[in-house]
Amino acid sequence: MSTFINYAITFLEFSESRWPEIKRIHDIWVDEKHEYLAKELRKYLSEKTFPLDNELELLRGVNMVTIMVFFNLLNKERFSSNSKFVMDEISRLSEKKLKNLMKLVNYFEANHLIYKYESKLYTQLDRFIVIFPHLIPVFGLQFYREIPRDLAIEKGLTTASIEDLKQFYVDTYEILAETIDLIVSFNNLEHRGDFEKMASRRRDIKTISDFIAKSKGIKIDFIDGTEAFDKLIYKILNNKIRNAIDHNSYKCDGLSQLIKFYPKDLQDESDVEEMYLLDFARCCWDLFLCIVDSYVLVYQTRKLFLVMSGYSSIDPKLIDEYGIAK
């Protein structure tokens, strides 16, 4: 339990004192003011593993300081597994399907989609910092040896209401639903050998361009756990809850903390989703973890573009990609 308290207090103190500096680093990166970026990054990163002498190295640096901020909050097993999966898959695709992988990367780069994802995901990390105090009990659950099944019913949550969390849920849903375009593109390449070739599930969706043009609700239906990159987002997004919040069609019992979400309207009881406030807060925490996973995929995709463009990094033996231990 002391680890939980230490991590929570350290994060609260860091987010208040140093997060504005990290945000400034990201703003400088987005504005492409590279001449100032290295100086700011050097406050946090050693010259041995981060020379910061070209755009690829600067990208690595920006990614590292971002991950470092949130590292102690993450489920380490999940983060390690998903990060390794992304890096291993991209490495394998580079060896076996390089030409088509380059097409995928160039498509998202040329259409500025990768920059949009990076910026929006970063915005959600910023918003997460604001709501973290409401989610501290949820963060603490990962330190339990065993979580009682009736915890949400018997104990509830006293640090937040649905009003404190609902906007984070909706906003995060929106950006993660956008990044599904990238996830599905990697699935297409992995399973069909061409990032543009969609799985045969709808007559009106044959190419990735068809898919990108569809609504977010339709896109989520393509993530069913059957393809490799689905693991990054599978079962995280609930369209019914999102729609209910967006249309203000929900009720929360203040005493029991039971929330009822009405995806159609408050008068329609046919498709109601029910969960307790603590479970809704846990959904928000899962969304945060998914933001980080998606951020890693976007980073690896952008890094690959720079490598293909001729930039080089230092000796890979010196690099621990999330090398908090180095």
Image (cartoon, helix red, strand yellow):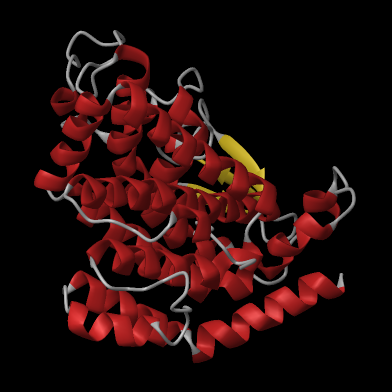
Furthest residue toward bottom? 17
Residue at 46 percent of width and 82 percent of height: 19
Residue 72 image-quadrant placement: bottom right
Q: Tell me if residue 19 comes above or below residue 32 in the rendering.
A: below
Q: Tell me if residue 17 comes above or below residue 85 in the rendering.
A: below
Residue 178: image location, x then y, percent: 29, 43
> Which image quarter is the C terminus in?
bottom right
Please tell me how many numbered marks the rendered image carries: 0
Q: Nearer the viewer, residue 290 or 21?
A: 21
Q: Nearer the viewer, residue 39 or 9?
A: 39
Residue 69: image location, x then y, percent: 53, 72
Residue at 47 percent of width and 74 percent of height: 48
Residue at 73 percent of width and 66 percent of height: 137
Q: Is residue 264 visible?
A: no
Q: Is residue 71 visible?
A: yes
Q: Is residue 253 left or right of residue 191?
A: right
Residue at 27 percent of width and 73 percent of height: 53
Residue 7 image-quadrant placement: bottom right
Q: Tell me if residue 240 comes above or below residue 138 in the rendering.
A: above
Residue 64: image location, x then y, percent: 45, 67
Q: Nearer the viewer, residue 191 or 125?
A: 191
Residue 58 image-quadrant placement: bottom left
> Which image quarter is the N terminus in?
bottom right
Residue 126: image location, x then y, percent: 42, 71
